[in-house]
Image (cartoon, rainbow, N blue to C red):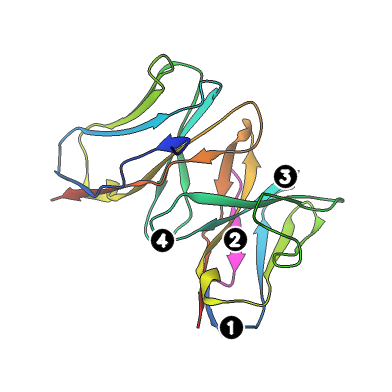
């Protein structure tokens, strides 16, 4: 399995500001995913980040709010823009495992609190 | 109705007990079934991965898939306090999009 790190691990931000979350993988991977996990709820896929192309966003998520970069096969960033308290959540990146796209491995997550 | 239903718990059992965790789903086309474990303040960790129906065993963990009933289970034998975590089921069609349960919080009492 891949080793995934995220920065920052947590942050407290003021409404109206933006935060960029970094995801670093110890091996080259084709597909990376960004999820949001709100307390007591399922993981929700935000977008799929492919190297060399624009991210693909799920229903309810837009690029202006959650811009994603994928400059190479080991790194991606997710920016949460113009934050509001409703954006308080855990943000997770994941990568496809060796068994195929159905097996995903996750980073430790970034805990975001927006005041 | 959610595509995947999972009782959020908490489920509290004594150490050494057999634990049964379950998910039901509505989409009969799901082919891939996974169980993840998530400790507090950590990302989900893949525990079991099953394709189609049947059982899969790995140490103290057994995953079962009953496609006719649209029901999957995870059994933990000889449960330990270190098994205390939230257990999430996930499933998918033949693509990369996982559909997740809400997770069951499990507490193993010493």
Res B59 seen here: no
Q: Quadrant of the N terminus of chain B?
A: top left
Of tags 4 and 2, the one toward the viewer is 4
Q: Which residue in the structure is indicated by mark 2? A: A5
CA distance separating discs 3 and 1: 31 Å
CA distance separating discs 4 and 2: 21 Å
CA distance separating discs 4 and 3: 26 Å
Parent chain of label 3: A
- On the image, the x and y values in percent for residue A93 come to 61, 55
Comparing B104 with A21, the one in front is B104
Instruction: Magenta stretch: give its range.
Output: A1-8
Residue shown at 72%/44% (left/top)?
Answer: A31
> Going by the image, does A64 lie left or right of B95?
right
Q: How many marks?
A: 4
- On the image, the x and y values in percent for residue B16 come to 15, 38
**Residues at badges 1 and 4 in contact (C-beta under 8 Å)?**
no
Q: Which residue in the structure is indicated by mark 4? A: A39
CA distance separating discs 2 and 3: 16 Å
Residue shown at 67%/57% (left/top)?
Answer: A61
Disc 3 crowd rating (10 Å Cα; few below 14, some 14-19, many 20+) is some
Comparing A26 with B31, the one in front is B31
Disc 2 crowd rating (10 Å Cα; few below 14, some 14-19, many 20+) is many
Q: Earlier in the sequence, mark 2 or mark 3?
A: 2
Q: Which residue in the structure is indicated by mark 1? A: A15
Parent chain of label 2: A
Against A48, is A76 above or below?
below
Q: Which residue in the structure is indicated by mark 3? A: A31
Res B16 seen here: yes
């Amino acid at each position: 399995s891949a080793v995934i790190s995220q920065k920052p691990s947590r942050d407290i931000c003021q409404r109206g500001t933006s935060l960029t979350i970094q995801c670093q993988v110890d091996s080259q991977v084709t597909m990376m995913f960004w999820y949001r996990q709100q307390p007591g709820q399922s993981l929700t896929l935000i977008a799929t980040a492919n190297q060399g192309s624009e991210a693909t966003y799920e229903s309810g998520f837009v690029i202006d709010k959650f811009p994603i970069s994928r400059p190479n096969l080991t790194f991606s960033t997710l920016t949460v823009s113009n934050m509001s308290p409703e954006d308080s959540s855990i943000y997770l990146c994941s990568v496809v495992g060796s068994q195929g796209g159905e097996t995903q491995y996750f980073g430790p997550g970034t805990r975001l609190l927006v005041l | 109705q959610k595509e995947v239903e999972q009782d959020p718990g908490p489920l509290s059992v004594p150490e050494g007990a057999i634990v049964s965790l379950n998910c039901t789903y509505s989409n009969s086309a799901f082919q891939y079934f996974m169980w993840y474990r998530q400790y507090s303040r950590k990302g989900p960790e893949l525990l079991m991965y099953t394709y189609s129906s049947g059982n899969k065993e790995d140490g103290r963990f057994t995953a079962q898939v009953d496609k006719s009933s649209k029901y999957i289970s995870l059994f933990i034998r000889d449960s330990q306090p270190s098994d205390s975590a939230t257990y999430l089921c996930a499933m998918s069609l033949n693509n990369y999009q996982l559909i997740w349960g809400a997770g069951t919080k499990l507490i193993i009492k010493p």
